[in-house]
Image (cartoon, grey):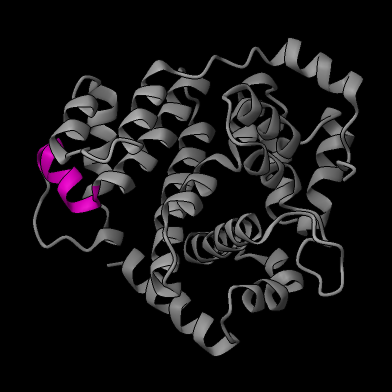
Amino acid sequence: MKVPHFDQDTTAALVRNLVIPPRPALLDQLAALRNDPEMSLLDVAGLIATDIGLSAAILKAANSPLFSSQRNITSVQQAVSLLGTRNTITLVSGLLLRLALTAESPPAIEQFWERSMQEAAIAATLCERLGRPAEECQSFALFRSCGIAVMLMRDARYERTLRLIGQARDRQISKIEQEFHNTSHDIVGYLVARTWNMPEPFCQAILLQHQPELFQVGSEPLLDHEHMMMVAVARAAQYVWRTSTDHHGDGAWRERADDIVSYLGMDSTEFEDWVDSMHHQLHH
């Protein structure tokens, strides 16, 4: 398959200029825990507790209204118990991405990471609604826009571009970024994911997520079903977050809504009922 908007010479230059940090050792420790059949809550909580920043972030996530806890969560062990061990590992992986890519965070970066964490939580609730395992879709929701964080750190002008693409159609996003920055956040995110040894189909999903033909009936499949579902769930979660927090809403959603909702196996009424329930949770 030909990868769109991907020039090898440009990519080589980007890799030199971006200075993508290496995969954190703690991520390997988490992966080992995930694959350990005897993994326990205490194992996961103990590993998180070794890092103060991660501990604080997990406590914040556990106290989010999206998890509907009736009590205040005050310890890492309580947080892991509420979130579940595998869900916690997924969230911590996203937090490690944040810490590695953006050690010093201007306000735009903080807003970006807050959005990513919330969208990952929303993605998990959609997976539960669909009767699907949530881990991979959550991971994708956390990683899929990491190129935005890198570009915000690399180029002060990108904050303006980010405002532009926030109201652009999905198919226009890469074109706008290419015009101003000679690359796109999908390409940069793809490079970060590859540098961190994420599975190649996962990397491809980051690269291809905004391609207009991705969900069009009759188009040649660009990804396998599992990775198409990751993109669909993450885009639906983005729609919920945008329509909940941005007075501009999500104008880009309309041109892809029917195809994505259909791919999720939902009808429009069922989908909007779920969106309404998520808006209610986010505001209470």
Q: Position of residue 31 (x, y in %)?
A: 39, 31
Residue under the point 68% across and 45% down:
163
- Considering the whole magenta stretch, tell me its main secondary structure: helix
Q: Position of residue 226 (x, y in %)?
A: 60, 58
Toward which corner of the image does residue 229 lie, by quadrant?
bottom right
Q: Nearer the viewer, residue 239 or 160?
A: 239
The answer to if 79 sits in the magenta stretch is yes
Q: Position of residue 228 (x, y in %)?
A: 66, 59
Q: Position of residue 281 (x, y in %)?
A: 32, 69
Residue under the point 82% across and 16% down:
12
Indicate left or right for 124 with 23 as reference: left
Q: Residue furthest bottom?
A: 269
Q: Nearer the viewer, residue 278 or 267?
A: 267
Residue under the point 80% across and 61% down:
221
**Magenta-colored span:** 74-84
Indicate left or right for 146 with 114 as reference: right
Toward which corner of the image does residue 1 lie, by quadrant?
top right
